[in-house]
Image (tube, rainbow, N blue to C red):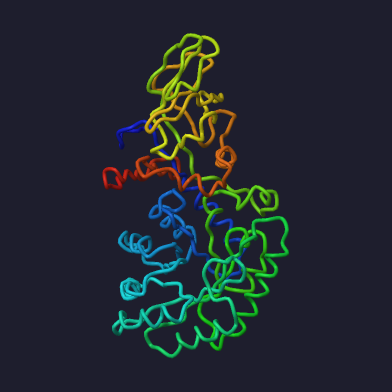
Amino acid sequence: MDTSQFYRDTWVEINLDHIAYNVKEALQLLPSTTDLFAVVKANAYGHGDVQVANTAIKAGAKGLAVAFLDEALKLRNAGIEVPILVLGASRPEDAKLAADHRISLTVFQEEWLERAEPFLNGSSLNVHMKVDTGMGRIGVRTEKELKALEKRIMRSPAFRLEGIFTHFATADEVDTDYFRKQFEKFQVMVQLLKQKPKYIHCANSAATLRFKETSHAFNLVRYGISMYGLSPSPDIQSLLPFELKPALSMHTKIVHVKKVKKGERISYGGVYEAKEDEWIATLPIGYADGWIRKLQGQEVLVGGKRAPIVGRICMDQCMIRLDEEVPVGTEVVLIGKQGRDEITMDEIAAKLETIHYEIGCMISHRVPRVYIESGKIVDVSNPLLSSHRKM
């Protein structure tokens, strides 16, 4: 990897061909009447929202979904013109800003509509009604609330009911009972509408890949985690209709190698003590990059072989134990394949007792993202320099 486009030897690679593949394979499962919106919230789960969005659109995505208005505005400022839906709550005073940028907002409170309408000042805002069928987060919960919200939307030219949706809490679990209850409740709620909106959607990645009834009954799916090549959960990976291709890998290079004597201590607190004479290498990555201290003991790949992180991870650096001396500048893989071995996000998540969704999100902004397409670097994102350098 040519790292001359940034000024440190730690970077993330994003394989855009894998993003495109994961989108195209999902589209093969959908009827022609059902659209796919790519979910690119949280900087595309740490992968890079603008680059992933453009790739997903080229692969067939008809729109995008984000969590907050700021994320949607970033995409508009990058020249992206497809429909964008904000899935989370927005402030009423920002309604006109959203309308002026053709960004759809999620609504679930009559009070919000009352407060937002004066700010629109003649503009018309596309809204999607959120129904809480069992996630317990945001959304109308009862038939009475649904009818009242629809009535309030329909009586004002300031709002256009563009969609209605819900979110599944357990579509990624083996037991489908709760999923079925949510799906049935949503179907009932949709039937209560006096006027069907353009988009009716409930399917996340898990439902899109597992339950075709969710994409056949309605006309939109929200495709998130699996676009990045990750199974919605390890429990259902064997149930998926095609093999996902992970898009993200994480790399660094050894910056120092030394041989320490038995009994020498490594890093803060001296918690690691060499059990014999050992080769220790230093890597220029630490918890400020998202490689948090709980990853002490996690293995990395050096020359296709595993090497453990020893001692406490520092803010900007960490140390690994080698079987033998290797040259400074040797590439190390923290996430991804090297030789015959692979370190997956699931492995990192298991070490941290969390889910792989969190791993990409926790890689900090100071780690450059390098975008690969057809084997070539097509873009480098380095927020520290406030630039996206095209190759």
Q: In this view, does 256 lie to the left or right of 337?
A: left
Q: How many marks?
A: 0
Q: Quadrant of residue 371?
A: top left
Q: Is residue 165 above or below residue 123?
A: above
Looking at the rendered image, the quarter that the C terminus falls into is: top left
Horizontal and vertical percent for residue 307? 53, 24
> Which image quarter holds the N terminus?
top left
Residue 238: x %, y % from top left: 70, 49
Residue lying farthest to the bottom in this orientation: 155
- The residue at the point 43 percent across, 43 percent down is 363
31 and 209: which one is in front?
209
Q: Quadrant of residue 342?
A: top right
From the viewer's perspective, tell me whether residue 121 is left or right of residue 274: left
Q: Residue at x 44, y 62 (%)?
A: 67
Q: Which of 165 and 310 is in front in this view?
A: 310
Query: Where is 302 relative to 173, above or below?
Result: above
Pick the front one: 52 or 355:
355
Which residue is located at x 42 percent, y 25 percent? 268
In the image, residue 69 lies at what x, y percent? Answer: 37, 65
- Residue pictured at 50% horizontal, 26% vertical: 309
